[in-house]
Amino acid sequence: MKLEVGNGINEYLSRLENLKNASEETCGKAIYAGADIVSDAIKRNLDGIPTDEGYGSPENKLQGLKKIQKIGLQKAFGIAKLRNDSGYLNVKAGFDGYNLLKTKKYPQGQPNPMIARTIESGNSFTRKHPFVAPAIRETKEQAERKMAEIVDQEADKIMNH
C-alpha cells in the first residue's frame, strides 16, 4: 500500500480516523470473502460423498449418506451473520435445521448438524468421510490471501482517495 501525506498531518489524521471508522465493515468484507472460499470447498466435498441407501451396523458400516440426508445437508449449509465478540469479528459456517429423514427418535427429521458430525467423524454404524476439515486445510492459504487483498484494497481506497 502506498501512502502520501501530501496536505499535512491533519489530512493524514483524518484519513486514519476514516480508516478506523470503516475497520469493521472492511474486515467484514474480507471475512465473508474468506468464508466463501472455504464454504465452496466444503460444498464440493459434501457433493463428493457417496450415497448409501442401506442400514448400517458395526459389522456392515454405511459407506456414505442416504440421499435424503445429503440433500438435507446441502440445503442446510450456510454462513451466519458477522458477529463482533469483544472485538473479534467472526462468522460461522455450518449446518442448521433438520433433514426430511424422520425416525422414531427424530420424528421432526434428523438434526443436520448431527448428520454432518457423523459423516465427518464416523460412528459405529457409518464410515467416516471427512469433508469439512480437509476443505479448511486445502483453502486456508487462499482464503487468507483473499482477505488480505480485500483489506489492502479497502484501506488504499480510504487512505488515498
Image (cartoon, rainbow, N blue to C red):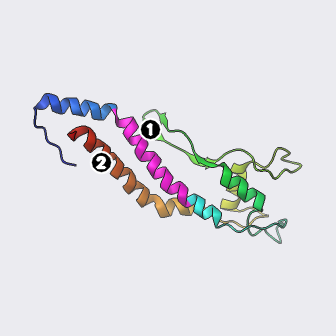
Residue closer to the observer: 78 or 56: 78
Q: Amino acid at mark 2?
A: Asp
- Local secondary structure at mark 2: helix
| Residue 28 appearing in the image | yes
- Above or below, 138 against 38 in this view is below
Res 154 quadrant in image: top left
Per the model, the C-alpha gap separating discs 1 and 2 is 19 Å
- Above or below, 67 against 103 in this view is below
Examine the residues drawn in magenta and state their main secondary structure. helix
In the image, is 86 to the left or to the right of 63?
left
Residue closer to the observer: 152 or 130: 152
- Within 10 Å of disc 2 (Cα), the crowding (few <14, some 14-19, many 20+) is some
Q: Is residue 126 magenta?
A: no
Residue 36: x %, y % from top left: 50, 52
Residue 88: x %, y % from top left: 44, 38
> Which residue is drawn at the image coordinates 47% and 61% (left, top)?
139
Q: Residue furthest right?
A: 104
Residue 40: x %, y % from top left: 54, 57
**Lower sequence index among marks 1 and 2:** 1
> Which residue is drawn at the image coordinates 30% and 33% (left, top)?
20
> Which residue is drawn at the image coordinates 58% and 63% (left, top)?
44
Q: Which mark is residue 152?
A: 2
Q: Which mark is residue 117?
A: none
Residue 157: x %, y % from top left: 27, 42
- Within 10 Å of disc 1 (Cα), the crowding (few <14, some 14-19, many 20+) is few
Q: Which mark is residue 88?
A: 1
| Residue 132 appearing in the image | no
Q: Point out the stretch of residues depicted in magenta.
A: 22-41
